[in-house]
Image (cartoon, helix red, strand yellow):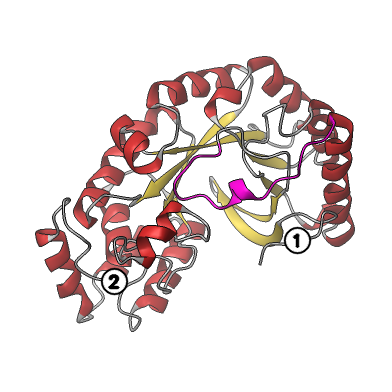
């Protein structure tokens, strides 16, 4: 549920995340901010959640209120990792005033921070300043810059997502971040618009392989149908289906790299799903794999016996890119 109060984040929740061999208590925060500067991605609804025009001072005050709400409801000693998302990019100075970025760094000093931003806002001085402010020596890499690369194919990025960025720009941002003392987390989007099921699988396998040299962490996000998006328009017309969970398992089994995956909305028509009968057990296996790294969980889930697997195999073999989806 997205909060409509200006005094609290759009969303905030507790969880657990794996970082190397450790499982950390984490806090995920989605701040409402000045809004995404790009504001054109076909699958994103958070771009609509923004404050109206205001001065940097008034915008900073609005973000500060949200930080204070977080501190009041989630004591600092109860988690080790903070994952920061916004309406667009945390390190965009027009979206989050630099003074407020400094305050956030001071607030979460000593934590592992994962902060999402578009590649063009990965500025060396800005990142090194943030790293210095949060680093108390507890973690080798105190900051991970999370970039929604989505795919390493510039054609898919342009036509299916309208990302307004390129793989080359991601590689440049990765180099800049590492020189500034930060790590890189790459977000990949499984099955954006206009791809068949098999094309989506192939794109993810290729993207994971190609991004691996540049990313410390990789997270594959099966596409969900968010409200007020172009993806939703196609979905309502029967022209888009989120990926099968079988496809998610196939990708995870096909790559050698450790890949995080959280099938948000899994088992529902707007999220990655199979037939309904096998969804729960497969989602549980994917979530447990994300925490433990135990690949046997993924192999066992892929071997699940369910009648819908035959349907999925047929879809992968017969779906054509110029046709409507074969299934819902």
Q: Which residue is mark 2?
A: 328
Task: Look at the picture and state if 87 lies above or below 139.
Answer: below
Name the magenta segment's main secondary structure: loop
Q: Residue at x 61, y 24 (%)?
A: 121
Q: Which residue is mark 1?
A: 4
Q: CA distance from mark 2 to mark 1?
A: 32 Å
Measured from the top left, where is residue 92 in percent x and y? 67, 29
Classify the position of the C terminus by image quarter. bottom left
Task: Look at the picture and state if 236 lies above or below 154.
Answer: below
Task: Please tell me in which quadrant of the rendered image residue 59 appears.
Answer: top right
- Decide if residue 47 is in sight here: yes
Please state which of residues 212 and 307 is positioned toward the viewer in this rendering.
Answer: 307
Measured from the top left, where is residue 254 in percent x and y? 25, 50
Measured from the top left, where is residue 114 in percent x and y? 64, 41
Secondary structure under badge 1?
loop
The magenta segment is 39-55
């Amino acid at each position: 549920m997205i909060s409509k109060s200006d005094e609290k984040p759009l969303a905030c929740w507790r969880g657990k995340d794996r970082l190397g061999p450790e499982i950390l208590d984490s806090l995920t925060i989605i701040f409402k901010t000045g809004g995404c500067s790009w504001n054109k991605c076909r699958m994103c609804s958070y771009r609509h959640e923004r404050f109206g025009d205001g001065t940097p001072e008034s915008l900073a005050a609005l973000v500060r209120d949200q930080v204070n709400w977080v501190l009041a409801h989630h004591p600092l000693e109860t988690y080790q990792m903070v994952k920061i998302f916004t309406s667009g990019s945390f390190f965009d100075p027009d979206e989050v005033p630099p003074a407020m970025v400094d305050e956030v760094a001071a607030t979460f000093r000593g934590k592992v921070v994962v902060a999402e931003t578009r590649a063009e806002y990965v500025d060396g001085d800005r990142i090194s300043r943030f790293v210095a402010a949060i680093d108390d020596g507890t973690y080798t890499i105190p900051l991970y810059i999370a970039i929604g690369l989505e795919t390493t194919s510039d054609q898919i990025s342009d036509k299916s997502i309208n990302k307004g960025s390129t793989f080359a720009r991601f590689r440049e941002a990765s180099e800049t971040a590492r020189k500034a003392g930060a790590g890189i987390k790459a977000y990949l989007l499984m099955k954006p618009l206009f791809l068949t099921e098999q094309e989506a699988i192939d794109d993810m396998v290729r993207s994971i392989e190609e991004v691996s040299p540049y990313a410390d962490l990789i997270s594959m996000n099966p596409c969900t149908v968010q409200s007020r998006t172009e993806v939703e328009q196609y979905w309502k017309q029967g022209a888009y289906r989120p990926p099968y969970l079988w496809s998610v398992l196939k990708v995870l089994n096909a790559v050698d790299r450790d890949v995080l995956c959280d099938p948000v909305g899994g088992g529902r028509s707007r999220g990655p799903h199979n037939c309904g009968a096998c969804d729960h057990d497969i989602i549980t296996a994917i979530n447990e794999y994300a925490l433990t790294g135990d690949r046997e969980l993924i192999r066992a889930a892929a071997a699940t016996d369910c009648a819908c697997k035959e349907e999925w195999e047929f879809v992968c073999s017969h779906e054509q890119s110029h046709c409507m989806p074969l299934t819902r």
